[in-house]
């Protein structure tokens, strides 16, 4: 494999109905990543047609990769500073915070009196949702991030390299009194919500940072081993598995970082093999696929009214397809990498971008309605991105020594690409307010 896409060269190339969300109205119903157990990404509430500005922002001690959830009047999310936060959703004031031993890039789930989440310290936690007191914790075999010797063909080939784009760990999904999540220890776990007792675990061939989805008694989840698995949600028995694509040489075009969407008896999944794939949820057979020709699809898809949407890495775009045929409906250029999973409210789709912009795009025409910029994006204007949000390739150095290419890539991802208030967190919407986190360490509420 002789060619690296732009995202692999980020240090090299770059070196360049209702007034409330249906999952929130009734506090007996759980809330979780992507809104529901199917990961629909659709919120039945009032959207934000016209942007006014910042309602409030809350500063944490590190980057926020975690996507927030709303339960009643509380907003819950994690931060790279190791805390799980609970804020008043109206004022942004802190209700409590809980310290773990690692970054919290997992998005929490809340049901009744418990908030459940995964931490990079290798523990899965259940806290009292009102007080933040620990109820129980479950220890996995430990977290780890995607790595390979000579990753993506970068020299030296005998050096173990951790993927700097592996931003998230698995977020929990709740169904029928059970919480499910994946782990970097290669397992998918099912725990009893009340006690934290393990019901079953299923071992895959690599770490699991994809977040499971559950529909009609079946759990669907991807793994860094490049397979999507369908498991019996009650027993953990394998029903089928689907190979999204292998790259044994450099592991550049393999792995599932995206989380599955279940829509109309179809599993939609984005892959590092540069594809959006539509898989029959019952048989595990491929219905159709779209290849980007290089850019990864790391976002979790969203679907509504027969259209499925996803973002791409160094394609820098949001794509829309007919769910039945795979025919492209539109292609919106966001200017930079899109890892924030889109959400839909009525005729608008909202998603974040590495350039520090949150976009509102019409779901039918693909035309931009408005954009919002994070504080760090504004203060860094012109440094790493142009004024219109496009990547400024001149701002990224090239390594003179090929053996230093990996260090350059890591530096560029961390010191430049993520330093401008990138929005990797996925937004949520309620009553005309959008909530999302940023790598400038802030949780934003805009209206």
Image (cartoon, helix red, strand yellow):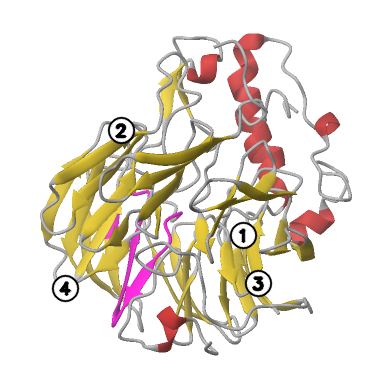
Where is 286 relative to 80, above or below?
above
Where is 40 relative to 379, above or below?
below
Q: Which residues are magenta?
A: 105-124
Quarter of the figure with the N terminus: top right
- Left or right: residue 434 versus residue 336 is left
Percent position (x, y) of residue 395? 82, 33
The residue closer to the viewer here, 321 or 89, is: 321
Which residue was labeled with disc 2?
Answer: 206
**Image depth: mark 2 or mark 1 in front:** 2
Earlier along the polypeptide chain: callout 1 or callout 4? 4
**Image depth: mark 3 or mark 4 in front:** 3
Which residue was labeled with disc 1?
Answer: 441
At mark 2, the secondary structure is loop
Which label is found at residue 194?
Answer: 4
Earlier along the polypeptide chain: callout 3 or callout 1? 3
Instruction: Write the residue at 85% across / 30% down.
Output: 394
Which label is found at residue 347?
Answer: 3
At mark 4, the secondary structure is loop
Earlier along the polypeptide chain: callout 2 or callout 4? 4
At mark 1, the secondary structure is loop
Where is 427 relative to 283, above or below?
below
**Image depth: mark 3 or mark 2 in front:** 3
Structural distance between the alpha carbons of marks 1 and 4? 32 Å
């Amino acid at each position: 494999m002789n060619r690296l896409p732009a995202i692999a060269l980020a240090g090299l190339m770059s070196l360049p109905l209702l007034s409330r969300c249906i999952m929130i109205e009734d506090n007996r119903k759980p809330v979780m990543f992507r809104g529901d157990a199917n990961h629909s990404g659709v919120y039945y509430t009032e959207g934000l047609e016209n942007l006014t500005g910042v309602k409030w922002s809350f500063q944490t001690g590190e980057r926020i990769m975690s996507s927030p959830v709303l339960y009643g009047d509380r907003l819950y999310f994690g931060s790279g500073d190791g805390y799980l936060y609970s804020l008043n959703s109206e004022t942004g004031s802190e209700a409590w915070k809980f310290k773990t031993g690692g970054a919290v890039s997992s998005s929490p789930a809340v049901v009744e009196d418990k908030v459940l989440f995964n931490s990079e310290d290798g523990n899965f936690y259940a806290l009292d949702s009102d007080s933040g007191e620990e109820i129980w914790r479950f220890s996995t075999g430990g977290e780890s991030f995607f790595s390979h010797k000579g990753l993506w063909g970068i020299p030296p080939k005998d050096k173990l390299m951790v993927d700097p784009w592996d931003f998230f760990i698995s977020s929990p999904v709740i169904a029928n009194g059970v919480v499910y999540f994946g782990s970097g220890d290669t397992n998918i776990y099912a725990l009893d919500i009340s006690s934290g007792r393990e019901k079953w675990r299923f071992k895959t061939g690599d770490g699991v940072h994809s977040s499971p989805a559950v529909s009609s008694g079946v759990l669907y989840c991807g793994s860094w081993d490049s397979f999507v698995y369908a498991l019996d949600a009650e027993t953990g028995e394998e029903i089928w598995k689907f190979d999204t694509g292998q790259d044994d040489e450099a592991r550049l075009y393999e792995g599932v970082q995206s989380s599955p969407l279940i829509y109309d008896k179809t599993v939609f999944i984005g892959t590092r093999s540069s594809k959006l794939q539509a898989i029959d949820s019952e048989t595990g057979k491929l219905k159709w696929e779209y290849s980007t020709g290089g850019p990864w699809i790391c976002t979790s898809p969203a679907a509504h009214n027969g259209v499925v949407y996803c973002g791409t890495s160094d394609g820098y775009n949001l794509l829309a397809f007919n769910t039945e045929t795979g025919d492209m409906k539109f292609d919106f250029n966001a200017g930079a990498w899109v890892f924030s999973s889109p959400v839909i409210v009525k005729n608008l789709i909202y998603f974040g971008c590495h350039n520090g912009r949150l976009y509102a795009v019409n779901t039918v025409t693909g035309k931009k309605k408005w954009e919002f910029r994070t504080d760090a994006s504004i203060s860094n204007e012109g440094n790493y991105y142009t004024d219109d949000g496009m990547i400024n390739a001149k701002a990224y150095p090239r390594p003179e020594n090929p053996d230093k290419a990996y260090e350059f890539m890591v530096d560029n991802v961390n010191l430049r690409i993520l330093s401008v208030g990138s929005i990797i967190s996925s937004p949520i919407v309620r009553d005309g307010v959008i909530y999302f986190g940023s790598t400038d360490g802030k949780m934003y509420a805009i209206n």
